[in-house]
Image: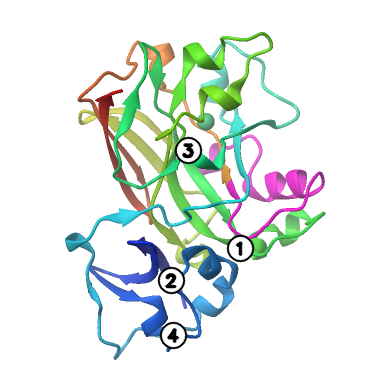
Amino acid sequence: MTFQLANIAGRAALVSGADYYDLAEASKNTLGPDPMAAVARFEELHAIDLNGLKRTGSVEDVTLDAPVPRPKNCFGIGLNYRSHVTEASMEVPTTPVVFTKFPSCISAPNSDVEVVGAAIDYEAELVVVIGKGGRSIAAKDAWSHVAGLTAGQDISDRELQFAANPPHFDLGKSRDTYGPIGPFLVSTDSFANPDDIALECRVNGEVRQSATTAQLIFDVPFLVEYLSGILTLSPGDLIFTGTPEGVGITTGGLLKPDDVIETTIAGIGTLKNRCVQS
Ligand code: ZN
């Protein structure tokens, strides 16, 4: 069975259509309420049948928190779409370009983004959520270690990112509020092909980015094998898989206060983030 996992006021919930079901109630207290613990037991989420259960409430009546609020590790992959490599006037990487988004930047799906300075940018990305950790995970086994997928914004302060030499991507991408994810963690079996998922970013309604994850240079199985060959992955670890062309730094569309960023990933949903003066 497929599932969609949400975080509502710090409690894990399963979502079906417009309704949500508190996970602790739906599982008769065998799972939940901690969203991080729920991710680690994702295999059991597949077995929960919501048919016949009483819903806890309607999703539109609540404020969603980040579905994975406290990852141990949060990786970002740079230059992982050829179209973005080209617009950045960089060379196509032969090894994944990996940086950290410090977990403290992770924020709710519809939270505000603080505009600090004149070079704040958006990056729509598919985010992989590790469910079963481990070391040296082979690419062919990688998807079985993934709890599910969510949408993410790798908000980037370009001035800060390139303030040092060599650049410190980590800091430029980790200001508070710079990691909205959500709205739900969607199980991998919900997708016809989890290696080919459409993503789009709109700013004030204008389409800025549109691509599919089939265009990733280093795909999800490769990234899981690569990262787990170096360090132990843990349940709840996040991998922001990279962004396609159309970012503000190259198109002249950097973010300013009152802009509204909408990030849509097919089969997952939409993040809606308002930019506010910091
Ligand atoms: Zn990125």
The amino acid sitting under disc 3 is Cys
The amino acid sitting under disc 2 is Phe
Describe the element under mark 1 as helix, strand or loop: loop
Query: Disc 1 to disc 3, how far (Cα)?
Result: 20 Å
Q: Residues within 10 Å of mark 2 (few under 14, many from 20)?
A: many
Describe the element under mark 3 as helix, strand or loop: helix
Identified at 40% across, 77% down, the residue is: 23
Q: Which mark is nearer the camera, 1 or 3?
A: 3
Name the residue beneath numbered marker 4: 27
Q: Which mark is nearer the camera, 2 or 4?
A: 4
Query: Disc 2 to disc 1, how far (Cα)?
Result: 13 Å
- Mark found first going from the N terminus, 1 or 4: 4
Q: Which mark is nearer the camera, 2 or 3?
A: 3
Query: Disc 2 to disc 3, how far (Cα)?
Result: 26 Å
Name the residue beneath numbered marker 2: 3
Residue 131, which numbered label?
1
**Residue stretch in magenta:** 213-238
Beta carbon at label 2 within 8 Å of ligand 1? no
Question: Magenta segment: does it hold 222?
Answer: yes
Name the residue beneath numbered marker 3: 105
Question: Magenta segment: does it hold 47?
Answer: no
Locate residue 153, reporting x and y percent.
Answer: 42, 37
- Mark found first going from the N terminus, 1 or 3: 3
